Amino acid sequence: MTMHTETSKKLFSEAKAFLVGGVASSLHKADFEEYPIYADHGIGSKLYDVDGNEYIDYMGSFGPSILGFSNQALNKAVCAQIEKGTHFALPTESLNALSRTLVEILPCAEMVGYQSTGTEANLVNFRLARAYTGKTKIVKFEGHYHGWADELSVSVKPLSLKSMGPRNRPWKCLESAGQLESSADEIIVLPWNDIDALERTIKRYKDEIAAVITEPVMYNAEPILPLPGYLAAMRQLTKDNDILLIFDEVITGFRIALGGAQEYYGITPDLLTFGKAFAGGYPIAGVAGSKEILQSGVHPAGTFNANPVCVAAALATLDILKTPGLYAEMDRITTRLRDGVNLLAKTYGVKLWCDNLVSIWQLSFGIDAPMRDYRDNFKVDKATYLRFYQKCLARGIRLHSGRGRFYISTAHNDADVDKTLQVFDDVFKEMFSRHA
Ligand SMILES: Cc1ncc(COP(=O)(O)O)c(C=O)c1O
């Protein structure tokens, strides 16, 4: 089955002449794709490309589109602010309302601060941790992504087990050409979901470690859940040793519960990074924590911080996300997808792991048990996933082009699930039935 995508192809060949890589983010086009599809518009759970093809979207714009596309209440709030002016570089009354709302919603928040992206917000949290503790080192985990800046881009996506060094003393892998070698000097890299490794490191370097930063659910590989008790033990260890715990909830925030992973797992970090789903598709991110830590003398700048259009979007998004029963409904939808995929796996005898957590779900080929850390990621059969991805895209289901992590929105419904499972059935039949 082939969709016509000639206009996308033509636009990409034009773009390559004047836009580096032809796209605005390295993730907007997968390496194996000749060209990406070009978006025209989106409505609810559906995305339409410039050639008029319709896709049920499970990319969620990398997470922000928690209300689906073009949500009417969100559009109305944003348009009302546009009429008043888009940017003043001054505080607005609505900013107070947003900050108050966040302090009510987020368990760790006595105060909040704003940036435009998760990358910037994590850099602010590194500064806050260093200013507050007077120490310099930060522990981060293999496979966790905290943004593209030099100090954050360490051991995010090592390409082979060999390049990572021994598990008990991982090497620090830099991610990009042009990245300073010294950017990893103050970073300690550890495997995730291994409390003994963290304990050994903290014992040895506790007087130098300002903070431990973690994604509470490791979503930047094939998704990996924390082992039972791991986050609680991490919380205790950091607390006992005067080390701050930073939860990077740029993905989990407002997605697995209104109060994010800290609400879902009942673990309160010292510092929080949030972004993505927070404003339903508008660029605003931030940090949260206690008054004492947030008032440590760090005053980050940023021309577009708390831009009023983004503030209006965030307020409208949070207002909708407060609707009772909304997270349970998203969980019901992803549970149906999970159960449907697992039934297909059984029917066609395919080894895969499919799981869900509220509005996020995953599908990994080649494994039939949950992974523990980034190193397990190499067991996943990526080649099969890529073939699966391409066949689904050609049938109007848009999955993640790089890994089996998918989002749904409040707009996804049972009809989307039915169609998705029908397409998956066709694709499984083509790929895995004995007569294929
Ligand atoms: C967990 C996590 N932290 C931070 C970031 C960086 O956020 P941004 O892309 O807004 O800079 C991302 C982006 O995907 C992320 O997944």
Image: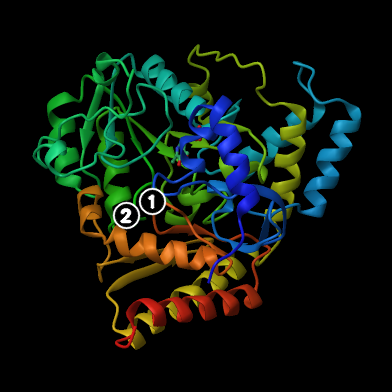
- The vertical placement of 238 against 75, above or below, is above
User: Could you tell me if residue 65 is visible in this image?
Assistant: no
N-terminal-most mark, 1 or 2? 1
Tell me residue 74's x, y (percent). 78, 48
Question: Which amino acid type corresponds to the residue marked 2 in the rendered image?
Answer: Pro
Residue where numbered disc 2 is placed: 226
Mark 2 neighbour class, 10 Å CA radius: few under 14, some 14 to 19, many 20 or more: some
Tell me residue 64's x, y (percent). 60, 46
User: Could you tell me if residue 27 is visible in this image?
Assistant: yes
Tell me residue 278's x, y (percent). 62, 43
Quadrant (top left, top right, bottom left, bottom right) of the C terminus = bottom left
Tell me residue 68's x, y (percent). 67, 56
> Label for residue 217?
1
Residue found 27% across the figure and 51% down from its top:
230
Mark 1 neighbour class, 10 Å CA radius: few under 14, some 14 to 19, many 20 or more: many
Residue found 74% across the figure and 50% down from its top:
319
| Disc 1/disc 2 C-alpha distance (Å) | 6 Å
Q: Nearer the viewer, residue 9 or 172?
A: 9
Contact check, label 1 and label 2, Cβ < 8 Å: yes
Residue found 68% across the figure and 40% down from its top:
101
Q: What is the basis of the colouring in this image?
A: rainbow
> Label for residue 17?
none
- The vertical placement of 308 against 249, above or below, is above
Q: Secondary structure at mark 2?
A: loop
Q: Quadrant of residue 428?
A: bottom left
Marker count (numbered):
2
Question: Which amino acid type corresponds to the residue marked 1 in the rendered image?
Answer: Val
User: Is 47 situated left or right of 214 in this image?
Assistant: right
Q: Nearer the viewer, residue 83 or 324?
A: 83
Q: Secondary structure at mark 1?
A: loop
Q: Nearer the viewer, residue 171 or 98?
A: 171
The verdict on label 1 being within 8 Å of ligand 1 is no
